[in-house]
Image (cartoon, grey):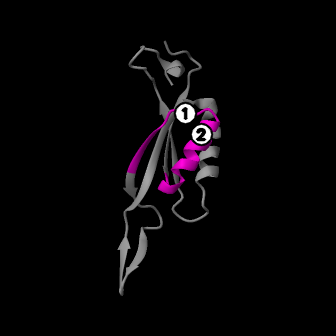
Amino acid sequence: MRMAGDVMKKIEAIIRSEKLGDIKNALALAGFIGLTTYEVKGRGRQKGVLLQYRTQEYRVDMLAKTKIELVVNDMDVEKVIEIICESGKTGNIGDGKIFIIPIEEIIRVRTGERGTDAI
């Protein structure tokens, strides 16, 4: 049963694919093991990149990125944000975005555990 203090958040981060290993390792070192990743394509403010092939220039506006999702206790949100930012930052445009979403309930399918026990 969910307790009144069980506040959970889903963290979704769109990152550079080459930074996934660094972020995953840093999260694991801090005790955040469970996560889901997706290969995604998208664009942000940079509106893609201008590439040149032989003498032709062309714009690739949907860039390959990686999406990370994990659910944490509310008190751990800032720590996870810090880890993702420190491990994923290159300082260049296109480093990504982090989204924080409230979670109403979590149920572990195997055991029926609920709330933070199911994380």
Amino acid type, callout 1: Ile
Residue at (48, 36) in percent of width and height: 35
Whether residue 119 is visible: yes
Please tell me the numbered disc located at residue 27: 2
Does the magenta-highlighted stretch encompass residue 44?
no
Residue at (51, 25) in percent of width and height: 119
On screen, residue 7 versus residue 39, left or right, reads: right
> Is 61 situated above or below 112?
below
Query: Where residue 54 appears, x then y in whole percent?
Result: 36, 84
Query: Where residue 101 appears, x then y in whole percent?
Result: 49, 37
Query: Where residue 111 appears, x then y in whole percent?
Result: 42, 14
Q: Nearer the viewer, residue 75 or 31?
A: 31
Whether residue 16 is visible: no
Amino acid type, callout 2: Leu
Residue at (50, 16) in percent of width and height: 2
Please say if the residues under marks 1 and 2 sit with CB atoms less than 8 Å apart.
yes
* Residue at the farthest top position: 1
Q: Nearer the viewer, residue 69 or 33?
A: 33
* Residue at the farthest bottom position: 55
Q: Residues within 10 Å of mark 2 (few under 14, many from 20)?
A: some
Please tell me the numbered disc located at residue 33: 1
Badge 1 element: loop
Quadrant of residue 33 within the rendered picture: top right
Does the magenta-highlighted stretch encompass residue 31?
yes
Residues rendered magenta in the picture: 15-39
Residue at (49, 21) in percent of width and height: 118
